[in-house]
Structures are given as structure tokens and as C-alpha cells.
Image (cartoon, grey):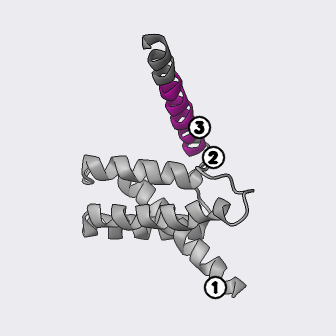
Amino acid sequence: MLDHLKERASRLKAETYALYLAARHPGTPWYAKLLVAAIVAYALSPIDLIPDFVPILGYLDDLVLIPLGIALAIRMIPSSILEECRARSRESLVSGKSVGRIAGIVIVAVWIALAALCAAWAYFYVTAS
């Protein structure tokens, strides 16, 4: 059972990285890039909609939202581009290369920008009343 879960987690990691590569591919449509960026940022982000320490529900968002987002993104990306990115993902994971520090910085920047946008929206909503 544990080996099966580890293998599924490894496949999910490889698929997430392939989607990250697809988002950077020039042949990927803009709407697919936007969805992929949101999925990858959420999957790699330490911030969740429901914190992981909440029993059962904490992992439910990771087990439901990420696979659903990945399935939707896979349907939006042309198959030739997706196969190319999957091959690059497998090569990178086998060789030990990862997304690295730049991806972490981008994810943190996206969350800070979203927080700032929400704060600005709340400020304007409160002051307009």
C-alpha cells in the first residue's frame, strides 16, 4: 500500500513538473498557461486553502483539487507539446534536476501579489461604504 502511494506521488510530481514545462512552452495556449501556472503554484506552495493540520479535510484539497486541475490542464494542452514536456520532466527527475529556487521565488511572489490584491480590494470595499 505504501509503495503504491509513493509511486502515485512520484507520478503526480512528474506530471506537475511536465505541466510547469508546458506552461513555459511557446506552443501552449495562453489560457492553458494561466491554468497551469495556478495549479503548479498551488501544488508547490506551502499555503493551502485548507491547512494540512486540519484532520482529513487538510489533505482533501490536495487529493481532489490538484488532480482535477491537472486533468483539466492536460485537456487544454496540445498532445504533442504535453508528450515533449513529459519526456523532459522524466529526464530532469531521473538526473536529479528540479525546478529550483527561482520557482520558489515565483510562487512566493504570486501569493504575495494575491494577498496584496485581496487587501486592496478589501480596503476599497470598506472605504467605499
Residue in the foreground of this view, choosing between 5 and 78: 5
| Number of on-image labels | 3
* Magenta region: 103-119
* Residue 89 spot, x, y in % from top left: 48, 65
Q: Secondary structure at mark 3?
A: helix
* Residue 11 spot, x, y in % from top left: 53, 74
Tell me the quarter of the picture where residue 76 sits. Answer: bottom left
Is 39 inside the magenta-drawn segment?
Answer: no
Identified at 53% across, 38% down, the residue is 106
- Residue reaching furthest bottom? 1
Identified at 42% across, 48% down, the residue is 37
Q: Secondary structure at mark 2?
A: loop
Which quadrant does the C terminus fall into? top left
- In the depicted structure, whether residue 123 falls above or below residue 75: above
Residue in the foreground of this view, choosing between 62 and 77: 62
Indicate the amino acid at tag 1: His
Q: Which mark is residue 47?
A: 2
Q: Is residue 97 visible?
A: yes
Tell me the quarter of the picture where residue 111 sits. Answer: top right
The Cα–Cα distance between marks 2 and 1, rounded to whole angstroms, is: 26 Å
Identified at 62% across, 43% down, the residue is 101
- In the depicted structure, whether residue 102 falls above or below residue 22: above
Give the crowd class for mark 3: few <14, some 14-19, many >=20 residues within 10 Å: some
| CB contact under 8 Å: marks 2 and 1 | no
Q: Nearer the viewer, mark 2 or mark 1?
A: 2
Location of mark 3 (residue): 108
Q: Earlier in the sequence, mark 2 or mark 3?
A: 2
The Cα–Cα distance between marks 3 and 1, rounded to whole angstroms, is: 31 Å
Identified at 75% across, 56% down, the residue is 53
